Amino acid sequence: MKQFLNFINGEFVATGKTFEDRIPATNEVIGLVHEAGQAEVDAAVAAGRAALKGEWGRMSVVKRTELLHAVADEINRRFDDFLAAELADTGKPRSLASHIDIPRGAANFKVFADIVKNVPTESFQMTTPDGGTAISYGVRSPLGVIGVICPWNLPLLLMTWKVGPALACGNTVIVKPSEETPATATLLGEVMNTVGIPKGVYQVLHGFGPGSAGAFITQHPGVNGITFTGETRTGEAIMAAAAKGVRPVSFELGGKNAGIVFADADFDKAVAGITRSAFENCGQVCLGTERVYVQRPIFEKFVAALKAKAEGLKVGGPDTPGVGLGPLISAEHRQKVLGYYAKAKEAGATVVTGGGTPPMEGEYANGHFVQPTIWTGLPESAAVIREEIFGPCCHIAPFDTEEEAIELANATDYGLATTVWTSDIGTATRVANAIEVGLCWVNSWFLRDLRTAFGGAKASGIGREGGVHSLEFYTELRNVMIKI
Ligand SMILES: NC(=O)C1=CN([C@@H]2O[C@H](COP(=O)(O)OP(=O)(O)OC[C@H]3O[C@@H](n4cnc5c(N)ncnc54)[C@H](O)[C@@H]3O)[C@@H](O)[C@H]2O)C=CC1
Ligand SMILES: O=C(O)/C=C/C=C(\O)C(=O)O
């Protein structure tokens, strides 16, 4: 059986305590994960701090960025290993992981290496009160040891989205992968050793949140900042831990994102776009659409078209021919999603399609599958319209005016993403300006440019990462003022 070890100071480390890693598509145990305790966290923090003072801390930006390019190249060289690890841990369709998760895992190192190498800091010249001159300029230093707390939905992509810029800026990182998806973070340890990243720069500790590695990392005074993607309530707990020592956090949290479809939208593209945003990755994307608002003249036609798309999604494992919908991550998460399916029925929803579990046979009989589900007819106060479900489901409601659509979309505590479908540039820009989110897609969804700001408003996060914005979190900016 596979053993997922911690990666501390360049070495793979076993502990006396293990938990099971299961394949979501079959519920089989794939391996044992070695849970890190306080001692391992202390050791990793000490190694991370030593690396900051050692070869890594002294390394030129050029050399550092060359090494990060080598990391990306090595991920690509071992593409099949990363893909196999991610598929076993998540069960997502092979086509999805091979087009998005693994390539982005590599790209996250190259993009941020290039940004750090090329982006200047500010500089000013001024006249001093005595009539002389002074010049000032900014210098960026690494923040220090960064705690990287990761979710399970896009394990390699989201972990490297943080590790890439953190290392490019000269920090060291301690990664805590989700307990559900330990594989690719562990594999990346091998890559780091192969390309010669110094010991203690990239470290991985396995375990859970409270009372385990997650809490021990975030509470550790030797950790200088924490970046986290996951549930809003977990963000609150991490923020409380970070308050001790006044340590900065960067959070990308939950969402309850709206999709707004105007009657003038390209109908087929809008249906295809909402099909992706509601069901891709089995709805386990924080940017996904769980609330769809469709302008009344096309409402019935849109519901029928989305129903046909949902029913056309083939449910299966990563290599099921034509698969469009994989399993949910775990039995526990499936219970949560099915709980919401039940709540929708209790609240009087019209179940347009789905609402339960698909009949699965053979090797997938025990996988964590649910049906893609569409509801209509619920009041906006219903739990399935207010709370993040993180499953392949959405509620569709009609609207009449642009103002009404904006009000409906904004009536949530969350503020992560919106997708707007219209052929009118005026409508698009007015809605994009009025919507209370960090990310607004128009006639698209999950179209990413890694140079742009990424993050959420309201309860969906704190701060922005992406492009130069990542530098704001991963560095301290010092101003140097020289009187001439
Ligand atoms: N990208 C996103 O926005 C994600 C949202 N979720 C949502 O969160 C729900 C719960 O899923 P979980 O995996 O339990 O998400 P979570 O947010 O609790 O866990 C994410 C990571 O945080 C760690 N963690 C949990 N509590 C912690 C603590 N007190 N201190 C430090 N680390 C801690 C976990 O071990 C994991 O690595 C899902 O049903 C879904 O609705 C889940 C994953 C990703
Ligand atoms: O950085 C991206 O392109 C994707 C981000 C997705 C999430 O943050 C998520 O689903 O949690």
Image (tube, helix red, strand yellow):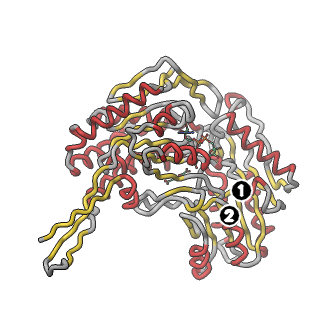
Is 261 on the left or on the right of 137, as rendered? right
Q: Which residue is mark 2?
A: 271
Counting from the top left corner in percent of width and height, residue 317 is at 63, 37
* Residue 319 seen in the current view: no
Q: Which residue is mark 1?
A: 309
Above-or-below relation of 133 to 34:
below
Mark 1 / mark 2, whichever is N-terminal: 2
Q: Which mark is residue 240?
A: none
Counting from the top left corner in percent of width and height, residue 457 is at 56, 62
Counting from the top left corner in percent of width and height, residue 279 is at 66, 52
Residue, x 25% and y 59% (percent of image)? 139
Residue, x 40% and y 55% (percent of image)? 473
Counting from the top left corner in percent of width and height, residue 364 is at 68, 32
**Foreground residue among 160 and 244:** 244
Label 1 to label 2: alpha-carbon separation: 8 Å
Above-or-below relation of 47 to 118:
above
Tag 1 and tag 2, C-beta contact below 8 Å = yes
